[in-house]
Image (cartoon, rainbow, N blue to C red):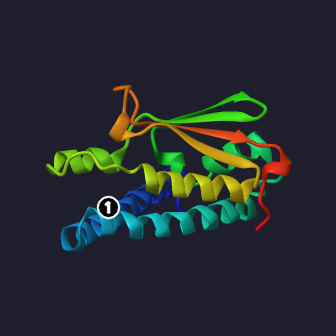
Amino acid sequence: MLPRETLDLLFEFNLRKLQMVDGLWFLGVEDRFGTEQATNIDYEVWHRIGISDARRARETFGISGDGIPALINALKMTWMAFVDWDMEQVSDSHAVFRAITCYPQKARVERGKGVFDCQPVEEAFFTAYAQTIDPRFRVYCGFCPRNRGNNDLWCEWHFRLVSPEKVKHR
């Protein structure tokens, strides 16, 4: 068995590698087919990942219940554990996610690609993830890179619970 420190490094190494694969995949599709097509494909992929990640987090880490506490606990146990972010529970029915550092955006800027309008893709992921944890969640973008008003943060997302009668049954 590897020491804990080595396991942590190995996990972070592989997580960064997965992020790099995602970023290089997107750049390749973008270069070949354009940003719009790459975004459309990315939207579908991250919607599916949101559902899968939420289910797997619940199962793997024994996260039970619903609402804001379950969402925060589940997000802490995904790839986001190694991303510079915070999540604040504002009330029993409202939480705010803030990305302090965005490695994919930083990499795009460093490569001269400019900031990418990631809002549709992030919204697909966060909505699918949150509604898999609790179908009452509605997700709203406070700001994203295209309308970024806060230079200390990359994006801000609001998670709100709506009343059960407003939830469409799947």
* Residue 52 picture location, percent across and down: 62, 68
The residue furthest left is 112
For image coordinates 66% across by 60% down, the residue present is 54
Q: Quadrant of residue 22?
A: bottom left
**With respect to residue 22, does 141 lie above or below?**
above
Q: Give whichever of 103, 9 is nearer the camera.
A: 103
Provide the residue designation for mark 1.
23
Would residue 92 appear left or right of 72 to someone viewing this image? right
**With respect to residue 27, does 64 lie above or below?**
above
- Which quarter of the image is occupied by the N terminus? bottom right
Would residue 32 appear left or right of 151 to someone viewing this image? left
Q: Quadrant of residue 91?
A: top right
* Residue 7 picture location, percent across and down: 51, 57
* Residue 145 picture location, percent across and down: 35, 40
For image coordinates 40% across by 70% down, the residue present is 41
Task: Find numbered disc 1 in the image and state the secondary structure of the residue it sits on.
Answer: helix
Q: Give whichever of 157, 68 is nearer the camera.
A: 157
For image coordinates 48% across by 52% down, the residue present is 122
Let me know if residue 3 appears in the view: no
> Residue type at mark 1?
Gly
- Which quarter of the image is occupied by the C terminus? bottom right
Let me know if residue 164 appears in the view: yes
For image coordinates 67% across by 51% down, the residue present is 74
* Residue 163 picture location, percent across and down: 82, 43
